[in-house]
Image: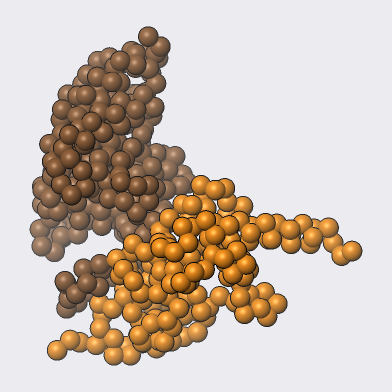
Chain colours: A brown, B orange
Amino acid sequence: MVEVNAGRRRPSSVVSLTRVPELAGWHREGDEIVLGACLTYADMERGELAALVPALAQAARTIGSPQIRAVATLGGNIGTASPAGDTLPVLAALDAVVEVAGRAGGRRVPLLELITGVKKTSLAPGELVTAVRVPVLRGGQEFLKVGTRNAMVISVVMVAVVVDLDGQSVRAGLGSVAPVPVRAREAERYAGEHTDWSRGRLAGPAVARRFGELCAESTAAIDDHRSTADYRRRAVAVCAARALARALPPLEA
Amino acid sequence: MTETVTYELMVNGERRVVEGSWLGESLLFALRERLGLPGSKNACEQGECGSCSVRLDDRLVCACLVLAADAQGRSVTTVEGLTGADGDALTDVQRAFLDEGGVQCGFCTPGLVMSVHDLLDRNPTPDDLELREAISGNLCRCTGYGRILAAARTVVARRGEASLHESEGPA
């Protein structure tokens, strides 16, 4: 719509998806939640869904303004595939699977395979994101974002940490630090090995700090008009350590 | 040649026909240029400034980010559709903006009035953070927001007093 308003795009036809009920809302299927592509950020911010996937709710609430969150959708965030897409680190951390429909039928693609580059996806012409599947996990979740101010801001870095107490794993998704959302696998492995899973606590505060450093090492941050690579790595280290300590509180040293 | 379409919108409780419109037109363009409702202001056209805030069904949106044709079958409320109680031309929110000096150049005012109404409809007693979040999508370059926040707090206080008097019953 912004590009149309600016005259950069003049579509010859328009398809409205807002009245397709299959794309709206969300529902639970066993241990999974199926999020419709037309689910808005306002829908994710509060209520039952926010309790089931808290990191997604936290991310949604940092996006734009209430006016924008009332119309902007999850499917739009995925299709746009911006490196700064705010839900993408959360979906990456959750191992989200995207449902795609096209003339040839439907397919399911992991989010990290769907997004191939800066604003690039593996969607074929005529294909449409219809839903996203994320697991319901027992354990803490945290989303942190740094921007140049609090509201209406495009993120400089984002960190999503998701704890799976039953699967005994920690997962970290990073955003705005590479062309595509990044999983900090090394950091995840380290945190998983330094957690007292019987008590559901990190082995100590130093684990969170080291986790943050490892997250920073997994980025491919660049200098651009919003920030510098150095600042981004530093901010990832601080945010990731803080997010993990909130999602999985450390035992006292 | 661009194909044009004709469709109907429900604006401020009235059926309005939009004729000869291009499908890519925003709701803001339709309201201002086709339906003669200039209260919703046109500034950034990218959702940044909030000057074009309107209610679409039960949600506050930037009219510049909604396709006008996509608003068919939904209820649009613009600042022109606000009316005060007891025949007052102004709502209590608009009155409080005047009383508190929340208006300077006035360009952002319609959008901010819509945002404050939307917040107080959902949450009659917002705390300061909720209030600031509710107007976070409305830019004002004159006031520094202090008088706008004061106006919103005044509405909350006045509505609180009014409901207190009601619950006490007639004297």
Instruction: Please tell me whether residue A154 is drawn above or below residue A232 in the rendered image.
Output: below
A135 or B95, which is in the foreground? B95
x and y percentages locating residue A101 in the rendered image: 19, 57
Assign the C terminus of chain A to one quadrant of the image.
top left
Residue at screen point 25% across, 83% down = B22
Q: Is residue A1 visible?
A: yes
x and y percentages locating residue A204 in the rendered image: 34, 13
- Along the horizontal axis of the image, is A38 left or right of A223? right
Instruction: Please tell me whether residue B89 is drawn above or below residue A139 in the rendered image.
Output: below
Q: Residue furthest right?
A: B171
Q: Residue furthest top?
A: A253
Assign the N terminus of chain A to one quadrant of the image.
bottom left
x and y percentages locating residue A236 in the rendered image: 25, 32
Q: Quadrant of residue B50?
A: bottom left
Please tell me how many numbered marks the rendered image carries.
0
Q: Is residue A53 visible?
A: no
- Along the horizontal axis of the image, is B40 left or right of A76? right
Residue at screen point 47% across, 46% down = A47
- Along the horizontal axis of the image, is B163 left or right of A5? right
- Along the horizontal axis of the image, is B156 left or right of A40? right
Instruction: Please tell me whether residue A164 is drawn above or below residue B167 in the rendered image.
Output: above
Instruction: Please tell me whether residue A44 is drawn above or below residue B121 in the rendered image.
Output: above
x and y percentages locating residue A119 in the rendered image: 14, 53
Q: Quadrant of residue B6?
A: bottom left
Residue at screen point 35% across, 47% down = A149
Residue at screen point 34% across, 54% down = A152
